[in-house]
Amino acid sequence: MKLSKFGRIAVALSASFVLALGVTSCSYNFTAAYVYVTGSYYNQIGAYKEDNNTGRLRPVPGSPISSGGSNPIRSLVTSNGRFLYVLNEGTPTTDSNGNISWTGANISLFSIGGNGTLAFQQSYNSAGNGSIRIAFDGTGSHLFVLDSYEPFTSNGSTAPTATLPCLGSDGFYHPYGDISVFNVDSTTGRLSIVTNLQQNSSNNTPLTYFPVGCSPIDFHATGGNVYTAEVSDPSLPAGSAENNQVILPYAYTASTGQLTTVPGGAEATGAVAISVIGATSSNNYIYVVDAGANNGSGQIIAYSQGSNGFLQTITGGVTANDGTAAGPVALTADSKSKFLYIANTKATSSISSSNSEITGFTINPASGVLTLLSDEPYGTGSGPVCIFQDPTHQYVYTADSDANTVTGHLINPDTGTLTDLRSGSTFATVQTPTWCVATGVTD
């Protein structure tokens, strides 16, 4: 059958239109980021490719792999997307005298390949014991590790002493906590310990760590400071002020990696049970989540940074979490510092069949005061342990420890509203997730 001239033109135009659609589709449907999830059940790391157009996660070939230690609890990626660090807490054992030892505890370094694959490089040990958190400074030139206990030879005591001043939940007194600081080689990712140039050990050699207070909980690093949430103020007499939860600022010198105590800088929060300390993306406001307030639904305490790193209480800066939530465990702010999201392990509302939810807030740019979004809360996977906005700023994800999933949400950049992804929002991941991070594609 012969087509008329008009028919031939129509077919040609149709083919051109289809081709144009195909090119457009391909240009948007690409791997935009790599997502990494640590899981404690088999000590694994799951790696995933994120589709730019849908937010869908697909496993990277060869995933999952070993975390390089025992009980991976935190991870972070370098800003250039070349390296992943995994903090393996290790498996603790406590004897009858309250002495604690850990097996399989380290910081594992992995290189990130062009397709998101991970290759183990080597591991490092923190100076202290019972490592619980890991973070970069503002430039990525130093890596901080928060340890539950500074180095010790004897850990347990039934009465407070100069070296064992901190009363633990086990009824024994333990050493102060510490922060271990590492230099980061930007080319290889390798770490080297930074010695404390201000304090010496009993044998008159520089300490390999920076002491903090009793029972550290979490910390947050900004350009010039590190803020540590702790159970009690170390300047108080040994054995006193249990459950006097404070935020202690430390001045940070980027050229040397030194941390210096800010005299009189301890901020008594009045919190019952701090679960996380975080900030806006610009670090102009610091947020402390008190999971024990309001019968367990929690509250958020907002601070601004004053001179010398002091935290300043914001007028009207204490905001109750949504009353339908419980167990707030992690927070993230969007890239423009307009919205704050909190992952909650429990929910009494009917919006989530998994009984977990995300609560959302607008951030007042002039004051940092939070206001609940009108359409929150948002359902997510059961037992979220982490939350982040992806590098493309389109999606928010949680890793869910009870469901062994990652749950994705589409974020409205104007209103902050979270909705389900267009092509399925739930993705299977490693067993018992503990943390999640992402990096942009650099190849």
Image: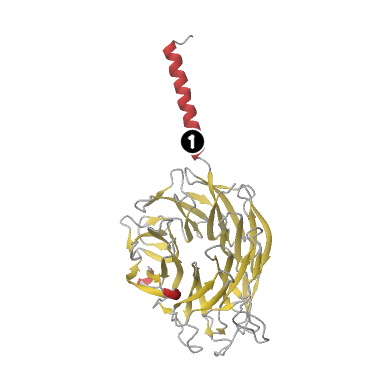
Horizontal relation, residue 3 to residue 324: left or right? right
Horizontal relation, residue 417 to residue 168: left or right? left
- Pick the residue in front: 204 or 47: 204
Above or below, 186 relative to 441: below
Element at label 1:
helix
Horizontal relation, residue 192 to residue 11: left or right? right
* Quadrant hosting residue 366: bottom left
- Pick the residue in front: 215 or 428: 215
In the image, residue 226 lies at what x, y percent? 50, 71
Q: By what rule are the colours in the image chosen? A: secondary structure
* Count of numbered marks: 1
* Residue at 53%, 54% in the rendered image: 438
* Residue at 45%, 22% in the rendered image: 14
Above or below, 418 relative to 367: above
Amino acid found under the numbered disc labelled 1? Ser
- Pick the residue in front: 325 or 306: 306
* Residue at 47%, 29% in the rendered image: 20
Give neighbour class at mark 1: few <14, some 14-19, many 20+ (Cα, 10 Å): few
In the image, residue 326 lies at what x, y percent? 40, 66
**Which residue does the numbered mark 1 point to in the structure image?**
25
- Pick the residue in front: 436 or 407: 436
In the image, residue 258 lies at what x, y percent? 57, 74
